[in-house]
Structures are given as C-alpha cells and as structure tokens.
C-alpha cells in the first residue's frame, strides 16, 4: 500500500466499521489492532440490536434510530464485499408486561413510536399466545417491536475485516506506524489513555458476562425478559446476556454470576432447560462518563480522532458511527451530536 489516507487503531466494531466505510468511499485504509481482531468487547456473544424506548426523545435516541434503520443495508454491504456472513436479521423482539400499569405505559410508548420511528417500524402491545418461544407475561400482554434485529458479533467482526481487505485496505494484528489521519477506537484502554492525556476521567470499563446455548430457534424474535437479552442466532445457538459489573477481580473470567444468569434465563424461558452450554464469555465494555459514544477530534492532536464508548450498544450504533466519522475525518463535515462530544 503506497499511500495511507487513514489509520484506524482498534479492531472492534467501531474501528472496523469506520475502516470499512472509509474504504468503501475510496480512501486508502490501514487498520491496526494490537492484540487480535475482536479481542475486546466486540468479541462477545449476544448481538442484540435493540432500540431505546420511544419516549424522552433526544439526540442519542435519534442517532440510534438512524443507525438501526441503516443496519440492514450496511451489513448487507459488508457481506457482499467480504463474501462472509454477519448473522444479521431484523426479526423483532418480544418483552413481557408485568401489570396493567405496564400495559398502559407500553401503549403510550407505541403511540410515541408511531410518531418517532418514521413509519419504518412498530412498537405494539399484543396478547400473549402461550407459545414456547415467548416469555411468561403476568399481564397476559407483550410488547412486540419490529425494529430490533440481531447479528452474530464474531461473524460480523470477521466479515468487517474481510470487507476492509477486499476493498484494498490493510488489517494488521500487531504494530504499524500511523499514516494519514488517525482514528483511535481502542476501547477501555483507549478511554484510559485519553483520560491520562487530558488529565480527567473520560470513561472506564464495565465487565459483562454472557453465554451461548445449543438450541435451534433461528428465524424467531429475540426476547427481553427479566433484564436479559435472549437472542437466537442463525447457527443454531441462543445467546444470553449479560451481567453489568463495576467491581471484579478478573475482567476476562466467568464465574458464578454467569451461572445465575443462566438460571434466570431458563426460569424466564423454560424451553431452554437442558440446552447445552457451548460458549461462555467475559470482557470489559467501554463506557464513557457521558453514557454516550465519544466521537470527536482528539484535543491537541491535529489529525487524530476518537471513536469509543460503545458500551452495550456498539453494534447497533456502528453503521451511523461509521458514516459520521467518515464524514468528519475524510470530508471535514461534522454531524456529531452535541452529547457525543468529549466532556469538558
């Protein structure tokens, strides 16, 4: 590669998506991952692409909506460029409702979705049918939304890397020099490094644990019950997650908290009883102090930019993050929402 327009540091979903979008626009791209592709939070199992509730509307929710609506075309483009599957499918989501008050609130949110979701998805209250792939609902009613989608994180990461290479970019595991503009999408370590450079806390890592069961439910909607995402994947597995831990000894170790999560999932969906566990995962997810992704120039470093803080919604935000960061870095067009900028 004779010339590099953009160096992206970090082989998670933000870094790879930005590299892919830049390469798709014709930029010469080099992505550098210090450990391995998907080594951090993006190498997990769950892959729930789900919206925030359609109320209390703000720039973060509007950005997420745009990204979720872009997702089908984005991931189809990744698959076409790489020749690899991502596991993406927009199959919706079901959630139980505890009581009459929850049903009333859900109906109000449905009216909000009608106004805010641009007629491209629905949030409905529907009666429970008693089907085995349905969480028990004390009210007899469920929320069904048609915006939620799923993908397989590890497949998606591999496909993104393949797409960058297919478009003429370099994907390097190890070390390489910076050339051109530089985007730092380096997860928890990147938040710490940025905070040290700026002399203030920018964010930290929140541990998550998740597991995957061998159970064929492909084509069925994901479920959100008891605070857990239950996500059927096309490979005949169901992913369940996740914990959120701010106190821990080993960020990479699974423990009894994951066993408790498994028990809760089976209680919420008894059809999963007896399904064998095929994978367990633990890792740190980067969370900014603003609770929103950080998309910004690096103060005092001309030509350097930050894309970090995806936390639990990184895959869902990735298509829009890629678009906005490519606009900013390659074309100088700043479409970053105010709440996504670096805290003062």
Image (tube, rainbow, N blue to C red):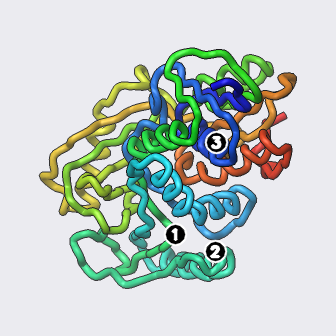
| Secondary structure category for the residue under label 1 | loop
Count residues near mark 2 (Cα–Cα under 10 Å), then give few for <14, some for 14-19, many for 20+. Answer: some
Q: Decide: marks 1, 3 in contact (CB < 8 A)?
A: no
Residue 262 percent across, percent down from the top left = 27, 46
Q: Which residue is mark 3?
A: 23
Residue 46 percent across, percent down from the top left = 39, 48
Direction from residue 42 to residue 120 in the image, left or right:
right
Q: Which residue is rendered at x = 41% and y = 83% of the image?
A: 126
Q: Decide: marks 2, 1 in contact (CB < 8 A)?
A: yes
Q: Is residue 237 above or below residue 98?
A: above
Q: Say which of 65 and 286 sits in front.
A: 65
Direction from residue 331 to residue 94 in the image, left or right:
left
Q: Which residue is mark 2?
A: 117
Q: Which residue is rendered at x = 49% and y = 21% of the image?
A: 173
Residue 186 shows in the view: no
Ranked by sequence position, the earlier of labels 2 and 3 is 3
Q: Which residue is mark 1?
A: 147
Residue 25 percent across, percent down from the top left = 69, 48
Q: Is residue 227 above or below residue 205?
A: below
Q: Which residue is rendered at x = 20% and y = 55% of the image?
A: 215
Quadrant hosting residue 185:
top right
Residue 184 percent across, percent down from the top left = 67, 29
Quarter of the rendering occupied by the N terminus: top right
Distance from label 2 to label 1 (Cα)? 9 Å
Direction from residue 271 to residue 198 in the image, left or right:
right
């Amino acid at each position: 590669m004779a010339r590099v327009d953009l160096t992206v540091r970090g082989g998670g979903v933000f870094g790879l998506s930005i590299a892919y979008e830049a390469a798709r626009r014709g930029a010469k791209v080099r992505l550098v991952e210090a450990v391995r592709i998907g080594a951090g939070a993006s190498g997990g199992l769950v892959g729930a692409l789900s919206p925030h509730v359609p109320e209390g509307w703000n720039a973060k929710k509007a950005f997420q909506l745009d990204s979720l609506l872009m997702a089908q075309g984005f991931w189809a483009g990744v698959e076409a460029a790489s020749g690899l599957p991502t596991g993406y499918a927009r199959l919706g989501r079901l959630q139980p409702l505890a009581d009459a008050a929850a049903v009333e609130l859900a109906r109000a949110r449905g009216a909000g979705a009608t106004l805010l979701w641009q007629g491209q998805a629905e949030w409905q209250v529907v009666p429970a049918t008693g089907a085995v792939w349905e969480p028990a609902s004390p009210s007899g009613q469920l929320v069904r939304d048609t915006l939620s989608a799923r993908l397989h994180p590890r497949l998606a990461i591999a496909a993104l890397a393949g797409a960058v290479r297919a478009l003429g970019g370099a994907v390097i595991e190890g070390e390489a020099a910076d050339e051109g503009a530089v985007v730092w999408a380096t997860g928890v370590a990147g938040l710490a490094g940025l905070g040290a450079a700026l002399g203030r806390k920018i964010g930290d890592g929140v541990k998550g644990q998740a597991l995957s069961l061998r159970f064929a439910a492909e084509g069925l909607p994901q479920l959100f019950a008891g605070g857990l995402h239950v996500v059927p994947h096309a490979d005949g597995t169901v992913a369940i997650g996740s914990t959120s831990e701010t106190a821990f000894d080993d960020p990479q170790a699974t423990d009894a908290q994951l066993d408790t999560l498994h028990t809760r999932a089976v209680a919420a969906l008894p059809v999963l009883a007896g399904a064998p566990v095929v994978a367990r995962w633990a890792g740190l997810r980067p969370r900014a102090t603003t609770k929103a992704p950080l998309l910004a120039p690096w103060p005092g470093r001309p030509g350097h930019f930050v894309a970090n803080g995806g936390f639990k919604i990184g895959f869902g935000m990735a298509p829009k993050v890629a678009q906005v960061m490519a606009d900013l870095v390659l074309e100088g067009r700043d479409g970053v929402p105010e709440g996504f900028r670096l805290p003062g």
